[in-house]
Amino acid sequence: MGVKSVGRKIVKNLFGIDGLSLFVKKQKKKIYSRIYKQKYTANDIVSMMCDMGMKKGSNVFIHSSMTEFYNYNGSVNELIDCILDVLGDEGTLLMPCYPKNKFMLSKMDDSEVVFDVNSSPSGAGYLSEIFRKYPGVKRSINLQHSVCAYGKNADFFLSEHVNSITAWDEFSPYYKMCQEKTLIFALGLPYFLGTVIHCTESILKEKYVYFSNFFTKEVKYSYRDYDGNVLKSIFLTHEFERKRNKKKIVKKYFDKSQFHVRKISNLRLEMVEAKYTLDLLLDLAERGITMYSKPDPKKFIVNKKFIECNVQEK
C-alpha cells in the first residue's frame, strides 16, 4: 500500500472523510471561515465580474466551486439571474456540465446508456447543476465534457459537440469560445484557467507526437438524445495519469493585464479571455513548453521543440 493510500485510510478512520484533498478542504474552510467575515450577495459578485470585463452582450463561461462561497448571502438562482440580467438578450452564459459517470470510463459497457442529455446530473459542481435545470438552458451531447448554455449564441456553441472526436476539437463549444470572444471566469478556483486549455492538445495532436499521446484510447458509449433516442458515439482520450502546474504557467508567461483577479471576502475571482489563453498556450507549445509534468515533455523535445509526427496528407 502506497503512502497516499495509507494517508487516505488514516484520515477516513480518524475523521470519517474519504480522501486527503477533501480533508484539507474541510480544514481550510474551518480556518478561513474564522478569518473572513465579510458577507456578500449576488449583486456584489456580479458587480465585480463587470469590473473584470463582463457586460451586456458578452459570452461568459463560468467554472465554480460553491464550497468556497463561505460568506455568500443568497441563492444560486439569484446569482444566475443577476448574471443573465447583465448579459441581456444579446449575451450567452455557459458552464461545464459533464456527467458524473465520465470518471468511470474504464468500466463502461457501450450497450449501456451512460449519458442522457436531458437528465444526467452535472458533475461540474452545484452551480452547474442548478444552471442545467434552469428554464431555457440547452446542453451539448458529449459524455466527456458536455456544456450547458443559455442565450443568443447557445445553439452556435453547443449544436455540433455531438460530432466531436475529442471533446475540444473544432466542433466543440471550447474551440468555438476561442473563435467568438468569450470571457472565462473561475469563481473559487485559483489558477484554474478553464477547460479550454485542452484545445491545445486537440489542435496539435496530428502535428506532434507528445500531444498525440493524449488521444490513444477510443471509448465507445451509448447516449440518449433530446428526443429520447438511444444512439452510439465514440471519443478519444488518454490512458495515463496527468499532472500539471497551471499556476507556474500563469505566473511565468501570462500577461498580467490579461489575467484578471479580484477578491471578495475569501472568494477569489479570476477572468481570462478564451482566445488569448489558447493562442498563448499554442505559442508555448510550439516552443516546447507545456503545463504538464506528466507526461514528461522533456522526453518528447528535440532542440527545444516537440518531435513532429509523420502525418501523410490524405
Image (cartoon, rainbow, N blue to C red):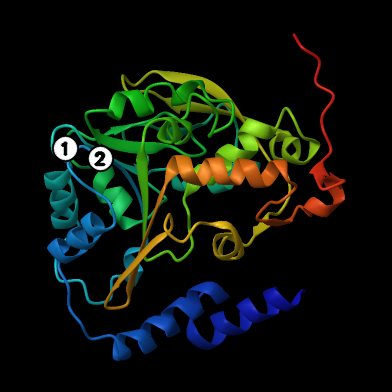
Residue 135: mark in rendering: 1
Instruction: Give amino acid for label 2.
Output: Ser
- In the depicted view, which residue is nearer to us: 32 or 61? 61
Name the residue located 16 percent from the left edge and 37 percent from the top edge. 135
> Does residue 266 lie above or below 256 as drawn?
below
Count every numbered label the image shows and give the total.
2
In the rendered image, which quarter is residue 150 located in? top left
Comparing labels 1 and 2, the label whose residue is closer to the camera: 2
Image x and y of residue 176, in percent: 43, 30
Query: Is residue 13 rendered to the left or right of residue 139?
Result: right
Instruction: Give amino acid for label 1.
Output: Pro
Name the residue located 61 percent from the left edge and 84 percent from the top edge. 10
N-terminal of the two: label 1 or label 2?
A: 2
Image x and y of residue 35, in percent: 31, 90
For label 2, the residue is 58
Contact between marks 1 and 2 (CB within 8 A): the answer is no
